[in-house]
């Protein structure tokens, strides 16, 4: 049975649109947890466009499941993580002009320092990368505990043949991650339709899903949106 991480960045995006106090991401986390979320995921971006430092601190205090912090692989962000102590840090690429995280992280030897710093603080380190065997092997080499496979390409493919091909690539990547004894996670662009074929591979331990859940919540409420996704992944 796989676990569900609910990304609540969009709740903060809506609040930041008016720079006000609602909707409150802390409430969203509580409702998500009450309806089956096994983890709350947030991305503290360097430009603070949605989640704020205050959210991160309050979430750490109030979350009763696990906190997964997505962040750029910089020393400055690692220092914040060291202080807040999320259960997991997911290292992601970050460009200021992008709408959302585009493509996986290109890992280099320079990432090793951040990984070691976080692990010394007893934080699990996951890396968000493309389903690429060489990159997965490199993730292991520099000490990652987990790999989150970027499923964005799969999610954007329209025709069935290309989708099947990409699912195969994702499956081979997931197998390799498992063989290397790292936790195997999937995320990005997953929705109420395209998640199921990945669940059927019966290999991912966790899914991190945001946009589709929060979009559905606008119409049906967050409780229902989370519990429906929980049924799909488990
Ligand atoms: N996983 C990672 C590493 C991400 O950066 C994101 C987007 O913030 C997600 C999962 C969630 O993606 P989506 O909002 O498309 O479900």
Image: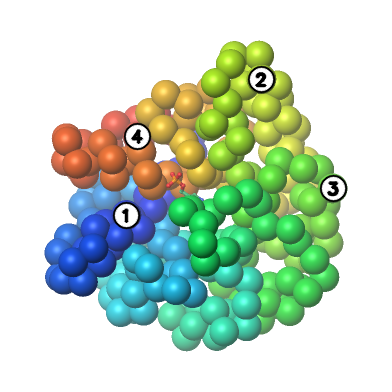
Q: Is mark 1 within 8 Å of ligand 1?
A: yes
- Tell me: 93 left or right of 207: right
Mark 2 or mark 3, whichever is nearer to me: 2
For image coordinates 17% across by 60% down, the residue present is 23
Query: Which residue corresponds to mark 4?
Result: 229
Residue that sits furthest to the front in the current view: 97
For image coordinates 46% across by 54% down, the residue present is 99
| Residue closer to the observer: 20 or 191 | 20
Q: Earlier in the sequence, mark 2 or mark 1?
A: 1
Real-space CA distance between mark 4 and mark 2, rounded to the nearest whole angstrom: 25 Å
Q: Secondary structure at mark 3?
A: helix
Real-space CA distance between mark 3 and mark 4, rounded to the nearest whole angstrom: 32 Å
On residue 162, which mark appears?
Answer: 2
For image coordinates 48% across by 39% down, the residue present is 189
Q: Earlier in the sequence, mark 1 or mark 4?
A: 1
Tell me if residue 48 comes above or below residue 138 in the rendering.
Answer: below
């Amino acid at each position: 049975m796989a676990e569900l991480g609910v990304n609540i960045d969009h709740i903060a995006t809506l609040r930041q649109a008016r720079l006000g106090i609602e909707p409150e991401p802390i409430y969203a986390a509580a409702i998500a947890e009450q309806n089956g979320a096994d983890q709350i995921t947030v991305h503290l971006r360097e430009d603070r466009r949605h989640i704020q430092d205050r959210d991160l601190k309050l979430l750490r205090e109030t979350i009763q499941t696990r906190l997964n912090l997505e962040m750029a692989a910089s020393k400055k962000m690692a220092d914040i993580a060291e202080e807040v102590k999320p259960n997991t840090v997911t290292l992601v690429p970050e460009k200021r002009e992008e709408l959302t995280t585009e493509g996986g992280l290109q890992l280099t030897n320079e990432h090793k320092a951040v990984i070691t710093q976080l692990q010394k603080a007893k934080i699990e380190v996951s890396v968000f990368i493309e389903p690429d065997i060489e990159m997965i092997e490199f993730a292991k080499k520099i000490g990652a505990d987990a790999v989150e496979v970027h499923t964005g390409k799969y999610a954007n493919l329209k025709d069935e043949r290309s989708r099947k091909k990409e699912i195969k690539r994702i499956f081979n990547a997931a197998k390799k991650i498992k063989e290397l004894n790292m936790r195997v996670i999937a995320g990005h662009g997953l929705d109420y339709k395209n998640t199921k074929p990945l669940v059927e591979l019966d290999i991912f331990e966790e899914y991190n899903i945001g946009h589709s859940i929060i979009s559905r919540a606008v119409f049906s409420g967050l409780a229902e949106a989370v519990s429906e996704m929980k049924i799909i992944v488990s």
